[in-house]
Image: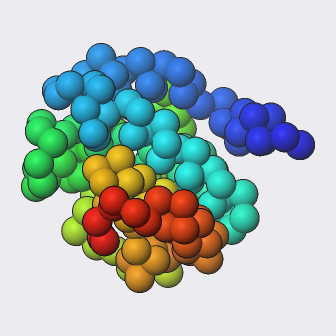
Amino acid sequence: MNTEKKKHAADEGADLKRLQELVVAHYAGDIHSIHGIAHWRRVERFGLEIAGESGADILVVRLFAWLHDSRRQNDNTDAGHGARAADWLLELHGSCFVLEAERLELLRYACRWHTERTATDDLTIGACWDADRLDLTRVGTLPDEAYLNTAHGKALCRHIRRQLRPGHRQA
Ligand SMILES: [Fe+2]
């Protein structure tokens, strides 16, 4: 199955297009900023690549990509934006997507702690957090595999570093 077909097979009836529209419509900042829509698309792509290798929960990974920065109020540290995302996604749950309680908690945990915590033993949370960190190159910083959790995330990190080392800062 090609990547696009796999992606849709893993939607599980979730209306991701509607979810994306709502996230964009409610975003408080500039949708084209460093934490905006292009970042969410790249996080989704990295997350799907990692999940394809690791067996992480594909729908949770995709939802994380679109939700984790959705409640940012600025492009600085913005303490609390992960917690706000973890709360807000409960309002979308049941309309745009439905997850069993355990998966919903995984998604909420991944959003809640995506900036404050780095290490996890959970495959799905690891895929989410690694996907987010692999996109540090957008702000001129090379990702560091010491802060990544998954084998494929680390492999992608090494590939990115080989490609982009000149001119980028270390994480
Ligand atoms: Fe992010």
Q: Is residue 53 visible?
A: yes
State the residue at coordinates (49%, 67%).
161
Number of marks in the rendered image: 0
State the residue at coordinates (35%, 47%).
138
State the residue at coordinates (65%, 54%).
49
**Nearer to us in this view, 26 or 159:** 159
State the residue at coordinates (63%, 50%).
48
Which quadrant would the N terminus be assigned to in this image? top right
| 116 relative position to 67: left or right | left
Residue reaching furthest to the front:
166
**Above or below — where is 37 with respect to 53?**
above
**Nearer to us in this view, 87 or 123:** 123
> What x and y, as percent, mark residue 151?
61, 77
> What x and y, as percent, mark residue 70?
29, 37
Would you identify the image quadrant in which residue 28 lies? top left
Residue reaching furthest to the right:
1
Would you identify the image quadrant in which residue 134 lies? bottom left
| 12 relative position to 67: left or right | right
